[in-house]
Image (cartoon, rainbow, N blue to C red):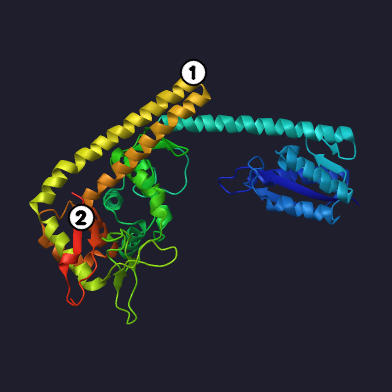
Amino acid sequence: MTRAGIYARISEDRDETQAGVGRQIDDCEQLARSRGWEVVERYVDNDLSAYRGNKRPEYRRMLEDIVDRRLDAIVVYHQDRLHRQPRELEEFFDVCDSAGLTQLASVSGDIDLSTHDGRLKARILGAVARNQSDAASRRLQRKALQVAREGAVAGGGTRPFGFEGDFVTVRESEAEVIRELAERLLGGETLRALCRDLNDRGITTPTGRPWSPTPLRRMLRSARISGQREHRGEIVATAQWAAIIAPEQTRRIRALVDDPARRAARPARSYLLRGLARCAACGAPLAARPRGDGERRYICPRGPGLPGRGCVYALAVPFEEFVVEAVLWRVDSPELAEAIRSNGQPPATNWDSQVDGAQAKLDELAGAYAGGVISMREWLIAREPIQQQLDLARRRSAQNGQVTVLADYVGRSGSLRRRWPELGFDRQRAILAAVLAEVLVRPGRRGFNRFDPSRFELVWRH
């Protein structure tokens, strides 16, 4: 008796009822009985697309059974359940040839794999199925773009943080958290520090899980939280829901988290001035190098492949205490308050306008190329300097957000001094980096064994 295997597949089963593949199996079993074939195995890939090239475990298992000569025939509802990619069809031919399987039956008609005409028919049906899938994909992509340009909600899934299950209504308790996180990120805190704080406070993701940097980055970077709609990573419209943060903040956040420089190695957590302290003699950044007894210190790194010349070293504790005290004094100074008033928001607004201007130029340039006014070569030549201007404006716009970390403390160093020990390492670092451009460290005086503040030159940002 002919041993038959039934293969059933459906591309989408949102309800996970398997009703579609169930109907395919019923029809295929009826066809096998009418042929007098014995159904020895059923292979079901539910909710899997053959067009996208997804791995289909049951299909691969069927091929293995054909190779092992456990099957004499294959029964499907329609050939497009088996293949929507020509290369998969050719692989199927090779497998069947190696095992001597020649019978492929379907509810819509049989195909004799032993003849050239049968294989030609299979190839034609496969090409038609591929064209239908291509057309459907184009329609879906066009529809998705149209929905995005209308600013409408698309798709389902897990509700976004900050919104209710309808994806439109703002959940105010979470919206407050988003506003806080956006300001702190733009103020210089790291994603990891923000995750630790959220988890310590018991604030979870919409699925109830602890926060980690990747989903937090995705959430803060999304256009959704600023009331904008994006399509394939590009913002294309104003959304049909309320904004939680300003669009300018989304722009700065994207420039900040997309900056490759953020992927550099993280500073040693116990060294507060790592990245800010530099050798005044040779300009090298000071490295964290504890003494033999374990006491922390900063040194000018010397050796093969290292940038410094071994010019200076400084014990960490008195050095950091001196800098922190100077920063607290600076935060309370009228000079800083005036600098932030005159150099805070206006430059950010200026850089934002430069971002808009550069983006408008790129759009105009793309339109000129699309209309045949300029050639590809001319487009490439003109595009490069505009893209550089856009990248610079985005970085500067993001950097101007550093003033937000100081907003609660300018002119109130007493408040900052009281809270300093409980702020945590990353928040302390962010405040120092918002006030200080760098600290230059000079070599110590020979025979002078006490802490010498004259060795340190603080360079202020504002």
Report how far apart the C-alphas of labels 1 and 2 lie in the structure: 52 Å
SS of the residue at dot 1? loop
Q: Foreground residue, 80 or 321?
A: 321
Q: Do we see residue 190 in this rendering?
A: yes
The total of numbered circles placed on residues is: 2
Q: Foreground residue, 97 or 265?
A: 265
Question: From the viewer's perspective, is 54 left or right of 266?
Answer: right
> Mark 1 = which residue?
371
- The residue under the point 65% across, 34% down is 133
Question: From the viewer's perspective, is 328 left or right of 32?
Answer: left
- The residue under the point 19% across, 58% down is 458
* Residue situated furthest front in the rendering: 446
Q: Foreground residue, 75 or 306?
A: 306
Say the numbered circle drawn on residue 249: none
Q: Do we see residue 236 in this rendering?
A: no
> Mark 2 = which residue?
459
- Crowding at label 2, few (<14), some or many (≥20) Cα neighbours within 10 Å? few
Picture quadrant of residue 206: bottom left
Q: Position of residue 210 (x, y in %)?
A: 40, 61
Of the residues shown, which amino acid type is indicated by label 2? Val
- The residue under the point 21% across, 51% down is 461
Q: Position of residue 423 (x, y in %)?
A: 23, 64
Picture quadrant of residue 147: top left
Q: Position of residue 402 (x, y in %)?
A: 25, 49
Q: Foreground residue, 442 or 90?
A: 442
* Residue situated furthest bottom in the rendering: 293
- The residue under the point 17% across, 60% down is 327
Whether the residues at callouts 1 and 2 have beta carbons within 8 Å, the answer is no
SS of the residue at dot 2? strand
Of the residues shown, which amino acid type is indicated by label 1? Gly
